[in-house]
Image (tube, helix red, strand yellow):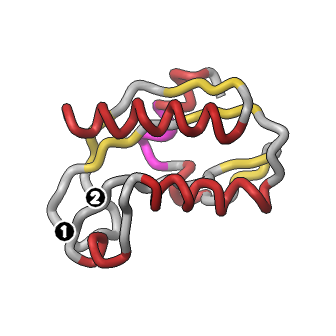
Amino acid sequence: MPGAEKVLLWTQRKLTEAFRGQARYSTPVQTEPVDFPFPCMFTNQLAIVETSVPLIVARPLLKSLERQLGRTDEDVSRGVVKLDLDLLCADGQVLRPEDWERDYFRSARQELGV
């Protein structure tokens, strides 16, 4: 996970800067891919960010961070995912219920008291 640790630290710094709010992060965990045709492991971490940035701005901001790290559609089609940022919940509304209920996110929510 050494490469993943650098990506997570970069992402934490960028999220804090971009959302101008307090952020908390769960312990990173290695997981098997879900709905991904390549046999690679993923490092997942839940971020809880309190911000005044509106939802309509938040989603494109996350995609911008992915591109800044060098994520391309071509890489993903070859099984290379440098960074995948998903907005799971905003303003108390779960936006991605299938992800929100995955075991590793349930554990992360419990760790962060959410």
> Per the image, is 106 magenta?
yes
Q: Residue at x 32, y 55 (%)?
A: 82
**Percent x, y for residue 30?**
27, 39
Q: Residue tagged by mark 2?
A: 33
> Per the image, is 42 magenta?
no
- Taking 69 as reference, is 72 above or below it? below
Determine the image quadrant of residue 84.
bottom left
Q: Earlier in the sequence, mark 2 or mark 1?
A: 2
Q: Residue at x 34, y 69 (%)?
A: 35
- Taking 114 as reference, is 60 above or below it? below
**Percent x, y for residue 13?**
52, 31
In the image, 25 versus 109, the foreground residue is 25
**Percent x, y for residue 39?**
15, 62
Indicate left or right for 90 with 113 as reference. right
Name the amino acid, label 2: Pro
* Cα–Cα gap, marks 2 and 1: 8 Å
Q: Quadrant of the N terminus?
A: top left
Q: Secondary structure beneath disc 1?
A: loop
Q: Residue at x 50, y 32 (%)?
A: 12
Q: Residue at x 64, y 34 (%)?
A: 17
Q: Which residues are magenta?
A: 102-107
Indicate left or right for 6 with 68 as reference. left
Determine the image quadrant of residue 58.
bottom right
Indicate left or right for 107 with 4 as reference. right
Q: Secondary structure beneath disc 2?
A: loop
Q: Residue tagged by mark 1?
A: 38
In the image, 67 versus 62, the foreground residue is 67
**Mark 2 and 1 residues: CB-CB less than 8 Å, in contact?**
yes
**Percent x, y for residue 88?**
62, 52
